[in-house]
Image (cartoon, grey):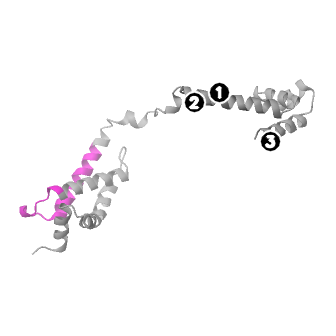
Amino acid sequence: MKDEFSEQIEQARRGDEQALSAVLSRQMPQIRTLAARAVGPGLDYDDAVQEGLIGLLSALRTFRAEKGAVFSTYANACVQNAIASAVRSAQRKKHAPLNTSVPYTEQESTPGPEELLLQSERYNQTMQSIDTRLSAMEKQVLALFLDGCSYSVIAKRLEITEKAVDNALQRVRLKLK
């Protein structure tokens, strides 16, 4: 006569998701314990748990009760082997260059024709907005500020006070918002 866990194992092998969930929840504490021991350079806890789950699923697929082994013992051995294999793979440092390299991003690529057109339109709108909304002095202050000049340099060139420069830039910010 089979016990309840043996029945769940058989049902899980046939594709019953509830039975599989029950088997996984019963074996999960052991998988977590083994995964915690395996954490090291190149293999973090979550990856070790994933490898343990893969080992458990392999055990479910290959277990044969007629051979006389208890499923928990067999599954534990499969989980240990899967995690140990992941540890060995992580220690080989085969993928170290991939893990330490700088990722390539699409932002570094050249913009396409649509993007260039949109940028051009935004630039033209901004320039038109500057031209229509700002006074002559505000335009001069903005141009010098964008060239990297400090408030004192702008004040000397335009023969105004630094406070007038600050006020002009504040008005520019408000007008172009």
Q: Nearer the viewer, mark 1 or mark 3?
A: 1
Q: Please say if 56 is above or below 164.
A: below
> Which disc is residue 115 wearing?
2
Please tell me which residue lies in front, 114 or 80: 114
Q: Where is residue 174? Give x, y as percent.
A: 80, 42
In terms of secondary structure, what is the magenta stretch mainly? helix
Q: Where is residue 165? Give x, y as percent.
A: 87, 34
Helix, strand or loop at label 1? It is: helix
Say few, some or many: other residues with alpha carbon within 10 Å of mark 1 (under 14 / 14 to 19 / 20 or more). Answer: few
> Which disc is residue 120 wearing?
1
Mark 2–mark 1 Cα distance, whole angstroms, equals 8 Å
Please tell me which residue lies in front, 9 or 121: 121
Part of the protein shown in magenta: 61-88
Residue at the spot x=16%, y=69% of the render?
6
C-beta proximity under 8 Å, tags 2 and 3:
no
| Left or right of 38 on screen, residue 149 | right
C-beta proximity under 8 Å, tags 2 and 1:
no
Does residue 66 belong to the magenta stretch? yes
Q: Nearer the viewer, mark 2 or mark 3?
A: 2
Helix, strand or loop at label 3? It is: helix
> What's the amino acid at mark 1?
Ser
- Quadrant in the rendering for residue 42: top left
Q: Furthest-top residue in view?
A: 157
Helix, strand or loop at label 2? It is: helix
